[in-house]
Structure formats: C-alpha cells, structure tokens
Amino acid sequence: MSATLYLVPSVLGDAAPIETLPSATLAVLRRLDYLVVETPKQARRFLKLAGIMLAGRKLHIDVLDEHTPESRLPGLLAPALAGNDIGVVSDCGCPAVADPGAKLVRLAHANAIRVLPLVGPSSILLALMASGLNGQRFRFQGYLPVEAARRERSLRVLEHAARERQETQIMIEAPYRNNRLLQALLSVCAPETLLCLASDLTLPTQSVVTRTIERWRADHPDINRRPTVFLLGSPARMHGGNSVASIGNRARQRE
C-alpha cells in the first residue's frame, strides 16, 4: 500500500493557524491519524489552536527530538510502510529545517515513501524576504557555538563571508540567549556591517529592522525570549560607489 510522509508546518509563536496556514494544509492535518512530533505538549496545543478535537479521536503521536536514537526511526516510519499517511510536525515553523525531522525524511526516501512538504511559515525565509539583504546568495548557519570565544571566532568568519562573497549569513538562537548573541555581534562586527533583527515573525509584536552595527550599538532592543532570526550582510554597493548605509546617513544629516 502506498502512503505519504507529510511535512506539516506549525505556527510561529502564538499565531492563529487559520491566519498563517493555508486551508489545504489544515485539511491534511485534520485527517491524519499518525503524527511524529518534536514535543507532544506543544503539538497538542497546536492541534487545539487549529480547531482539531482530540477527545475521542484515535490519534497516534510519536516523538522525534534531538535525543531520539537512530534505532527508533524505523518504528516511527512503520505506519507509512503499512500504508498509513504520517504527518511530521515541528515545535515551530517548518519541519526538517533546523529540526530532527530531517532524519525521518531521509529514511522515508530510502524506503521509497512519498514525501510531500506542505505550505506554511518559515521564519528563515520570512526574515530574509524582509531584511533587504542579498536574497540570491545566502547561507543558513543554524545555532552558533555557545562558548564565547568560539562564538566570536565564528562571527568573524561569517562577517568575512558576508563581505567577500556578498552572502547573507542567517543565524538563530535559543530565545533566552538572544541578547548574548546580539552583544557578541555588536562587539565583534565592523561598524558598517549590516545586521537585521527579525523578531516575533507573524505575531502582532513582530519587528524586522536592518541597520548598520554602528546604529545598533547606539540603540538596540531587548530581544530576550523573543524568537529572533539574525541576518548578517555587507553594505550593498549602489551606483556611484554609494552604499545603502551611506545614503541613509546623509539623509539623516539633512534632517
């Protein structure tokens, strides 16, 4: 029997599913009897927000997180091998992107199980779209080292790549460590380097702002526990050798 492994995007933060997920994605989610999730409590909350009643329903929920051993993966895929569709749901945003769900997707391909990604919010792409930085050449770095000296070395390498290759560098951090990463960026990077902070995407409190490091040093927000995507870029060169940053600086001087 043929089955499909659906990659079901979740909401970002407390956004209402009906506002950020297409009806077709929610329709698939409503009919699935097998789910593989990162955190059951978070998944049940998401299902409740999506208007999916759990009481009296025969819904099988298995866990795939960073601690799941490789030996558990065949068991998670077993329902699909028996002909049942499975949905993979991350705690936030798109599954299998900076998410352990990628392991199950790879195994599904190895077993000729159809894999179908569904449409939903991706904080990485939403942030890149709104940043004004290079959207044609970019690299997602995920989480940087927590240890301060290693993190600073990584940031120097990423800033160099942003400058030399005009390549936007995209990072995320555990929300409770956001301010530490921001302080590291402000300390390590050159004044003219561009930094975008994209916080609370899709939420009423969302904020996406791109400024030079110099301007962020003069005035930067408290982003503690606010889901944030960090994007690092080199000032874009424009006609006549001017940069976006220098044009903005001259405009402020005339005010």
Image (cartoon, rainbow, N blue to C red):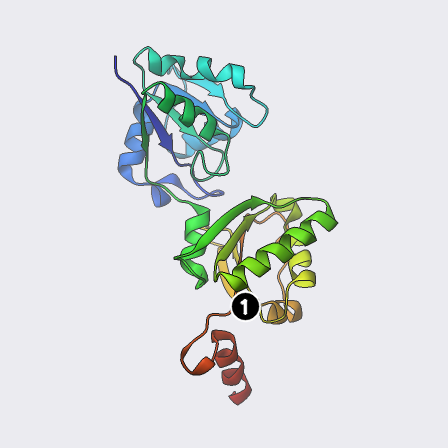
37 and 192: which one is in front? 192
Q: Is residue 163 visible?
A: yes
- Name above or below for residue 78 compared with residue 145: above
Residue at 39% of width from left, 44% of height from top? 121
Question: 157 or 177, which lies in front?
Answer: 157
| Quarter of the image where the N terminus is located | top left
Please give the name of the residue rendered at 43% of the width and 64% of the height, measured from the top-left corner.
Answer: 132
Q: Position of residue 72 (x, y in %)?
A: 51, 15
Left or right: residue 229 versus residue 185 is left
Picture coordinates of residue 209, whole percent (x, y):
51, 63
In the image, residue 240 above or below residue 17: below
Outermost residue to the bottom: 254
Specify the quadrant of the image occupied by residue 16: top left
Asked if residue 220 lies left or right of residue 3, the reply is right
**Between 5 and 168, the one nearer to me in the picture:** 168
Q: Position of residue 57 (x, y in %)?
A: 37, 16
The residue singled out by tag 1 in the image is 211
Q: Is residue 20 above or below residue 223?
A: above
The residue under label 1 is which amino acid type? Answer: Arg
- Number of numbered discs present? 1
